[in-house]
Image (cartoon, coloured by chain):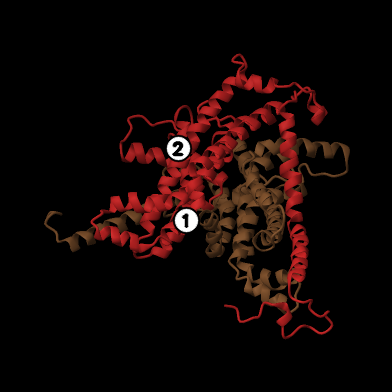
Amino acid sequence: MGVMAMSPRRRRRMTNWGLNALTYAVLVVMLSPILWLIASSLQTRGQLASGDYDLLHPTVAAFGQMWKSVDFGKYLTNSLIICTASAVLATAFAASAGYALARVPFRGQKAFGVGIVGTQLVPGSMFLLPVFLGFIWLKQNTPIHLFDTQLGMILIYTAFFTPVAIWFMRYFFLAIPPELEEAAMVDGCTRFGAFWRVVLPSAAPGLVATFVYAFLLAWDELLFVTALTATRAETIPVGIHNFIGNYSEEYAQLMAAGVVSTIPVMLAFFATQRWLVQGLTAGAVKG
Amino acid sequence: MSTHSITPANAPDTPPGTPPAPPAGAGARRRSRRSGRHLAYWLIAPALVFMVLVHLIPTALGFALSFKNLNTFTFRQLFGAPWTGLDNYNAILFDSANPLHSGFVDAVRNTIFYTAATVTGTLAGGLGIALLLARQFPGRRTVRTLMLAPYVVPSFVVAVLWGFMWQSDSGIINKVLVDQLHLFHDRPTWLLGHNSLLAIIIPSIWRGIPLAMLIFLAGLETMPRELHEAAAIDGAGPWRRFRYITLPLLRPLIAVQLLFGVIYSAYQFTIPYVMLGSNPGSDADLIMTLIVRQSFSNNLIGFGAAASTLLMAVMLIWVAFWFRAFRRDLEAD
């Protein structure tokens, strides 16, 4: 039976099925690299080199070996400490600054808003070079050690991701009805008291989403950590890069390391997805 | 809407001990507004301090460094290195005998191509998938969630993973293209030569699509249905409805993504650096990989600062251009 002979209703149904099938096919294509990552991490080095996978007999050997080839434990610890601390700080700063932008009019508000967007315009290398020289200068001339320390990276990442976090928090504060804090102020709260005791708790999902987003960005950062660390404060991306340099043939371990470094951010993202998606789209949709 | 009274003077339960509320009026409001302003400055202070210390001052210093002769020999002087005027800029832009010049030209060409292809691919792919996911179909929620997964794979893992998949002999991509589909006679080399730019573009698009899709999906969801229905009654087919209703309404979203997509792509570093190494070769070297290599491997800090300044200037021009092109869309909001 040809397409032309079909009734319009039938044809519409066929189109619908076709589009559904296309949707699922696109999903499979989009997910296939991730599935390939997982599949490859569960094979042996030899199977990866030859390309003859045995998917029915997976092995987790690579997940054990990867910790010994490079000091992956060190990188993971550094990443967890640096990203958690800087995401907490960035979220805290963003909560207070975002509240000011959303609710408390002040002179210079517009300039501050423009400045926040402006930070995104500066290429990383532009301020990386002076920061690098500054860290070295501090190390040589003062007892303040920021080069190759977790503290140095935490300070940098906090500054780095605070502007984006501010936009996130501002959106979440705007979504809270102003009556809430007005009522609290009527009941005798100061403006700050209302912010602290009433607004912040009701912005909890926003705080979580902002934290996770800042964490994701910090987890993925490579440029600054490459330049500003040497041996002690290196994070996972540097570790992976070192791994490629030294064990370029150990693809099974590399894939296992890829899986291990993706799991924490995947879990965090999907656990908080509902709010994170609001924050991610709000900036673009609401202007 | 609120059941609470907002005028302080009428507050029924003023805590004991607080001074009687001043007569409601301009004075009280002005005072509360002034204290509010002080509060605002305290609230933005931590963020502001960090932005000044890590963004503003270093950016200014970076600009200053671009006029300095800071290399291996003068490195020990740090910020005290000698001034050289416009020498760095001259060498980069005009000195054809200088290897930095040809390296810079290659990197500019590659970066323009990378940015154009990545942004176009990401927006087109994101829009296409958003249109598919805006329909009703079984498993819609699950599919929407799973479609976000590539965005959560860290860039450095994306680079490692695709670098492995692009392998000429054992990589899955050649296995599919050559051994299964027989599209090529010889196995293409993806990580060297002309193909290597493509090898970083496609993973970048893959990772960028979910975010573009999310934003378009949010836009499609707020789109008034009646417009489409009215147009359908008037006999407009799906393509015409897309072209004359959907696309114009999505324009502001396209504009915002263009702005940040171009900046983000032009500053891309992680994917080429991890997949192709600190020197991706003249076919895939981007501005950022060039700047980092010259600044840190070759200690040409002055060069790096000058190239960064030029890159930033180009981005400022892009923002100005963007603003002119899309000003109307911004005002429409």
Residue B266, x across and y down, in percent: 55, 37
Crowd band around label 1 with a 10 angstrom C-alpha radius: few (<14), some (14–19), many (20+): many
Crowd band around label 2 with a 10 angstrom C-alpha radius: few (<14), some (14–19), many (20+): some
Of helix, strand and loop, which one carries label 1? Answer: helix
- The residue positioned 57% from the left and 35% from the top of the image is B317
Horizontal side, residue B4 vs residue B321: left or right: right
Q: Check residue B214 in the rendering and tell me which mark sits there, or answer none.
A: 1
Locate the N terminus of chain A by quadrant: bottom left
Residue A76, x across and y down, in percent: 66, 51
User: Of marks 1 and 2, which one's residue comes earlier in the chain?
Assistant: 2
> In the rendered picture of this protein, how many numbered marks are placed on residues?
2
Of helix, strand and loop, which one carries label 2? Answer: helix
Residue placed farthest to the right in the image? A142
Q: Chain of mark 2?
A: B
Q: Amino acid at mark 2?
A: Ala
Seen in the picture, residue A277 relative to A183 is either above or below; the reply is: above
In this figure, which residue is indicated by the disc labeled 2? B117
Q: Nearer the viewer, residue A45 or A12?
A: A12
- The residue positioned 61% from the left and 43% from the top of the image is A240
Q: Nearer the viewer, residue B281 or B49?
A: B49
Q: Nearer the viewer, residue A171 or A71?
A: A171
Give the letter of the red chain: B
Give the letter of the brown chain: A
